[in-house]
């Protein structure tokens, strides 16, 4: 549930903070007061495309923050995105600057993609664009599937997995058939490349060892000279060698030790140093004697490195990659040498997979057909409740190869008849804007118990309706509010009267600035705003009485709705 909205420097809003509650949260105000700015702000925090024009004039940034409280089930779903709620809360925020924008979840910078993924779990916005999406028939199957619930979802998982295998086998078969005409040429190339790799008899890591040896061999004389100098410095013929000087120091310490026993430790340490230096000197002598230029070995190492480097330029950047490339060529050669059997195996596996896919699609189709009848009946009743006196709604599901995909091979289309004596026709051929909004609301009311998104926003869902129909719409809003938190922008008093919380959006003009402010209304304020929406030029006692009556009637509806 969305508990708080914080907005700063967005369009006409300098700074605002709103605390939303459960049930139906109504936002009203004069046209142009800034209601759409709030929706734009929420969408910005949810990851919508950043529009720099939203930054308030004279401000260097805009900031929006949404605070959600989540239950254990929602926390589990968020953790799948590696989002960890803190104290049962998730905070989505967006800072928009001229040069950049920053998305955060619980204070940590995240990508826009992750922000949108989290948003999709927490909130859903329905406006005129959402209503018109009903005109797209691909949306109909999505709605039907959601109404079917877990039974169809499990079947769709089977379809998706099998379809993935089917696609992979189809691509392999197409590739194999395209290769059939050049099989001999491919086999010759495979044999050549594989022979070149196998002839080299490569060993993992040998290139590094050879390069080290090559470096040592090519610098043998320099190494020998350096070792000779080091040996002479330790134990040369000169009286100034390290061992000679250490020996002199050791003799002097022993003389002094006769008069001071505490010097014994130093003498012992110096004696160990002398032994160590003698051992190093002997090793240097051994290394120097063994260090000589080996032209034959140098040529062998150089030739081997040439072979390895030539293979690297053709088959991979390392010996491991070259060996892996050779293994792939061996596998391909085996397939080509027994190509007919390989092709037959692919065709058999593809046929078996397609049979399995058809079976799963058939089961899904049966589930959808049964659900279509239930769904159509529920929507017909909901539309009747929303003021359609003679309405018939039908969901038709057909199987068609052109729709084969990870969801199956079904195509769904909503048909509707809104007037007595007319035939059922596709929804896109019948409904007007206002009718579409009521159909969407009917769908939302039927889906209320199945929809897992806790917060729904309706942006002027009342477009194109009035009178008794508006009251029917408000009753449906009360029903949906039993299972969801609703935020609704409206101009209709019938819907505003149903508010559990009511927010008034006002635009105030100063000397040089215009600002949008949000005011929380108490019961008296709610009645006053409903009176204003009823269309009175001035808020008279009669207007207030009518508004109070409407508000009381709404309270009775909410009681009956179980609120």
Image: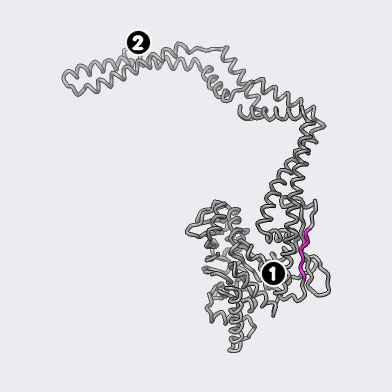
Mark identifier at residue 530: none
Identify the residue under disc 1: 442
List the single residue furthest toward the left: 259
- Would you identify the image quadrant in which residue 135 lies? bottom right
Q: How is the image coloured?
A: one colour
> Where residue 108 appears, x then y in whole percent?
51, 53
x, y percentage for residue 506?
57, 75
Front position in the image: 146 or 26: 146
Q: Quadrant of the C terminus?
A: bottom right
Q: Nearer the viewer, mark 1 or mark 2?
A: 1
**Residue at left 72%, top 69%?**
439
Mark 1, Cα crowd under 10 Å, few <14 / some 14-19 / many 20+, is many
Q: Is residue 114 magenta?
A: no
Q: Is residue 491 above or below residue 238?
A: below
Task: Bin the neighbour count of mark 2 within 10 Å (Cα to Cα): few under 14, some 14-19, many 20 and up.
Answer: few
Main secondary structure along the magenta-highlighted residues = strand
Q: Is residue 531 left or right of residue 374?
A: left
Q: Which mark is residue 237?
A: 2
Q: Which residues are magenta?
A: 392-397
Give the image location of residue 136, x and y in percent.
Answer: 75, 61
Residue 491 percent across, percent down from the top left: 64, 76
Q: Residue furthest bottom?
A: 541
Among the 4 quarters of the image, the one containing residue 43: bottom right
Q: Is residue 319 left or right of residue 335?
A: left
């Amino acid at each position: 549930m969305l508990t708080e909205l914080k907005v700063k420097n967005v369009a006409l809003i300098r700074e605002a903070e709103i605390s939303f509650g459960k049930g139906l949260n109504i936002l009203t105000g004069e046209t142009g007061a800034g209601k759409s700015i709030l929706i734009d702000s929420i969408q910005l925090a949810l990851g919508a495309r950043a529009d720099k024009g939203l930054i308030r004039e004279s401000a260097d940034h805009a900031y929006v923050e949404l605070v959600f409280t989540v239950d254990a089930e929602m926390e589990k779903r968020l953790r799948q995105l590696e989002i960890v709620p803190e104290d049962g809360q998730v905070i989505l925020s967006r800072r928009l600057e001229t040069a950049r924008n920053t998305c955060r979840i619980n204070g940590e910078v995240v990508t826009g993609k992750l922000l949108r993924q989290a948003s999709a779990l927490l909130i859903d916005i329905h406006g005129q664009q959402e209503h018109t999406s009903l005109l797209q028939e691909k949306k109909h199957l999505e709605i039907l599937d959601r109404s079917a619930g877990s039974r169809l979802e499990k079947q769709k998982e089977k379809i998706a997995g099998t379809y993935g295998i089917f696609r992979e086998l189809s691509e392999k078969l197409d590739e194999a058939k395209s290769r059939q005409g050049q099989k001999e040429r491919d086999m010759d190339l495979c044999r050549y490349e594989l022979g070149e790799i196998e002839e080299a008899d490569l060993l993992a890591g040998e290139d590094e060892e050879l390069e080290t040896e090559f470096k040592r061999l090519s610098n043998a004389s320099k190494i020998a000279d350096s070792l000779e100098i080091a040996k002479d410095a330790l134990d040369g013929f000169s009286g100034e060698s390290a061992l000679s000087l250490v020996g002199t120091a050791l003799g002097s310490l022993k003389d002094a030790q006769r008069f001071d026993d505490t010097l014994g430790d130093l003498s012992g340490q110096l004696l160990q140093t002398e032994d160590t230096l003698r051992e190093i000197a002997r090793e240097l002598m051994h290394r120097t004697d063994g260090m000589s230029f080996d032209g034959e070995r140098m040529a062998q190492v150089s030739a081997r490195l040439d072979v390895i480097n030539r293979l690297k330029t053709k088959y991979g950047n390392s010996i491991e990659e070259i060996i892996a490339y050779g293994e792939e060529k061996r596998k391909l050669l085996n397939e080509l040498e027994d190509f007919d059997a390989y092709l037959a195996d692919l065709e058999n596996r593809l046929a078996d997979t397609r049979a399995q896919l058809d079976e799963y699609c058939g089961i899904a189709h049966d589930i959808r057909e049964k659900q279509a009848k239930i769904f159509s009946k529920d929507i017909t009743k909901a539309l009747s409740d929303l003021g359609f006196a003679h309405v018939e709604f039908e969901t038709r599901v057909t199987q068609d190869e052109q729709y084969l995909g990870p969801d199956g091979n079904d195509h769904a289309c909503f048909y509707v008849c809104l007037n007595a004596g007319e035939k059922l026709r596709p929804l896109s051929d019948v409904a007007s804007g206002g009718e579409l909004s009521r159909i969407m609301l009917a769908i939302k009311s039927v889906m209320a118990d199945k929809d897992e998104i806790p917060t729904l926003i309706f942006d002027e869902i009342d477009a194109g309706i009035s009178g008794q129909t508006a009251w029917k719409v408000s009753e449906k809003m009360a029903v949906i509010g039993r299972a969801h938190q609703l935020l609704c922008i409206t101009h209709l008093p019938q819907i505003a009267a149903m508010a559990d919380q009511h927010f008034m959006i006002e635009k105030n003009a100063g000397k040089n600035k215009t600002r949008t402010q949000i005011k929380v209304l108490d019961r008296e304020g709610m009645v006053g705003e409903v009176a204003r929406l009823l269309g009175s030029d001035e808020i008279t006692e009669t207007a207030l009485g009518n508004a109070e009556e409407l508000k009381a009637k709404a309270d009775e509806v909410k009681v009956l709705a179980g609120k």
